[in-house]
Image (cartoon, rainbow, N blue to C red):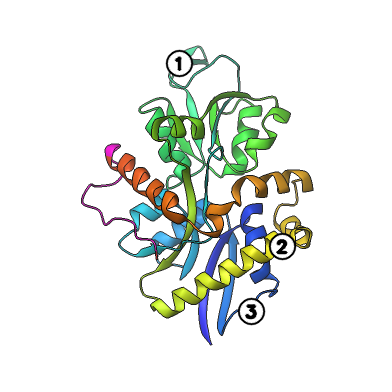
Amino acid sequence: MTRIHLGISTCPNDTFAFHGILTKQVPLRGLDIHIELLDVETLNQRLFVGDFDVAKASFHAALLLANELKVLPVGSALGFGVGPLLLAAKTGTHPRDPVEMSHRSRPAWVLCPGKYTTATLLYKLFHPGEGQLQQTVFSDIMPALKTAVADFGVCIHEGRFTWRDQNLFLVEDLGESWEAKTSTPLPLGGIVARHRLESECIETVKTIIKDSIIYALEHRDDTLETMRQYAQELTDDVMFKHVDLYVNDWTVDLGDQGRAALVVLRRHAVSLGMLPGSACPLRVF
C-alpha cells in the first residue's frame, strides 16, 4: 500500500470534511493514509521543512511553495463572507493610532495568526506599515485582547462567531475589504500535494477527499463526534456555523472562479513584496 502522510487542521470545517477518512467511512482505494491534525500555521511551517505528502495549507504559504506543491481542486476554504476579522480591545480605535502605555507612546500592538497565513497577508494588504505585528496561535488572540495584552487582533476560524461574546470590537471585516477590492471570493486555504507524488496517486487522493466531503454533507449529524473531539471548547451550534460558512461548493470543486481568485491573491502578494514576481505560479492539479 502507498503510504500518504496527510496533515489537516483541527478546525471544524476540516474535521467535518475529513470525517469520512478519519473514521474510514469512505474507501481509501489502496492508500495507507496517516493523518496529523494541527493548527494551520503549524501545518504551514511543517510544509516549509518538507513534511507531509498532502496537507491543508494557507494559500499564502502555498504561493510561497508553488515550486514544490500543487493545489488540489477539493477541500478548499474559499468564498464570500469568510474573511478574518480585525478586532480591537477598545471601541473607536485603529491600528495606526498611537497607544499610551507606561506613560509613553508606542505603536499599536497587532496580533496575527501566523506569518504564512492568508490572514496576515490580508492585514498587510489593507494596513501596510500600521502597528507592530506579532504572530501567535490563533486561539490566543481573543484572550490577549480581552486582557488588554494586545490592542488589535486578526481573528480567524470561530472568532467570526464568538467575538461579541468576548466584549470585543469590530474594526474591519478583512474579507469584505477583499471582496470590495477584487470582486472575487477570498481564497483562505486549500489542500496541497507534493510534486514528488505520482499523478495517479494524487488523482486517487483527490477522489478520496471528494468522497469524504460528500459523505459529510450527506451524513451531517454523523460528523459531530469527530468535530467535538478536536474542538472541545466549541458548542455544536458554533461548529455547524463554522461548517456552513467554510464548507461550500468551492470546497467540493474549486472551479474556474476559485482558480481565478488564486491568481488575484498571487498578484496582490507580489504587489506587497511578499512574493517575487518571478516566483512559480500556483498550479491546480
Q: Is residue 135 above or below residue 249?
A: above
Q: Using the image, tell me which numbered label, if any, was put on residue 256.
A: none
Tell me which residue sits at (60%, 62%) in the image: 37
User: With 134 as the anchor, is 147 left or right in this view?
Assistant: right
Q: Amino acid at mark 3?
A: Pro
Which residue is label 1 attached to? 97
Most distant residue in the left direction: 278
Percent coordinates x, y for residue 3 in the rendering = 52, 81
Which residue is label 2 attached to? 218
User: With 79 as the anchor, is 260 left or right in this view?
Assistant: left
Q: Nearer the viewer, mark 2 or mark 3?
A: 2
Q: Amino acid at mark 1?
A: Asp
Q: Secondary structure at mark 1?
A: loop
> Toward the viewer: 119 or 21?
21
Percent coordinates x, y for residue 100 in the rendering = 51, 14
Of mark 2 and mark 1, the one earlier in the sequence is 1
The stretch in magenta equals 271-284
Toward which corner of the image does residue 284 lie, by quadrant? bottom left
Give how far apart the Cα atoms at labels 2 and 3 are.
16 Å
